[in-house]
Image (cartoon, helix red, strand yellow):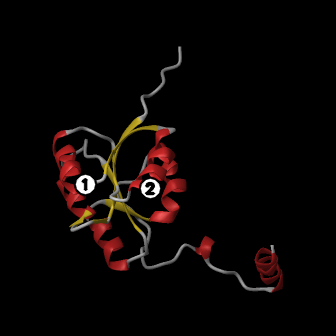
Amino acid sequence: MLQTELPAHVLLVEPDEAARGVLEAAASAFAHVESHGRFDTARARVCHASFDFLVTNIRLDAYNGLHLVYLRSPGANSPRAIVYSDEHDLGLAREAQRAGAFYEIHKCLPVTLAAYIGQTLPAWDRRDPGSRDRRTIFRGGRRCWDQHLVRLVH
């Protein structure tokens, strides 16, 4: 008989209701999602509940999502943290990495969330936050420019 693992339990903290709905829908296919829009309710859950992943926006109105990362229970059973922001901020990315969290851009998170939760992550985010993702860099050349024009026309 095959033994199936229970899905991960994710604590999602996003103040914007529409963005929270998108992320919750993206994660609910493969995890139990508990979402919060306010820092104070999320802080209580971080301190008193058990979950596998903390996914938080860096900007939580007057608070910072990194505070929630610092409040995680230390030790082997500490939940993995993913901190995201609307724009790439090198200083915040490095601070998130120092706190033991993975840093992501908000627009990429609905797609990458499955990879974060479905795989065994390394102990820390080894990516260099100062280097851009080469997959998103515009590549020169005639063929690439022709394809860009086709997208503009249609």
Whether residue 112 is visible here, answered yes or no, is yes
Q: Earlier in the sequence, mark 1 or mark 2?
A: 2
With respect to residue 76, does 4 lie above or below? above
With respect to residue 18, does 48 lie above or below? above
Horizontal side, residue 60 vs residue 144: left or right: left
With respect to residue 123, does 10 lie above or below? above
Where disc 2 sits, the SS reads helix
Residue 3: horizontal and vertical position, in percent? 48, 21
Mark 2 Cα within 10 Å, few/some/many (few <14, many 20+)?
Answer: few
Disc 2 marks which amino acid?
A: Ala
Horizontal side, residue 65 vs residue 10: left or right: left
Whether residue 119 is visible here, answered yes or no, is no
Q: Residue at x 51, y 50 (%)?
A: 115
Horizontal side, residue 87 vs residue 37: left or right: right
Q: Is the C-beta separation of discs 1 and 2 under 8 Å?
A: no
Check the image and name the residue furthest to the top. Answer: 1
Mark 1 Cα within 10 Å, few/some/many (few <14, many 20+)?
Answer: some
Numbered circles on residues, count: 2
Where residue 38 is drawn, which disc sits there? 1
Disc 1 marks which amino acid?
A: Arg
Where disc 1 sits, the SS reads loop
Residue 40: horizontal and vertical position, in percent? 18, 53
Q: CA distance from mark 1 to mark 2?
A: 14 Å
Residue 2: horizontal and vertical position, in percent? 53, 19
Q: Residue at x 42, y 51 (%)?
A: 121
Q: Which residue is mark 2?
A: 18
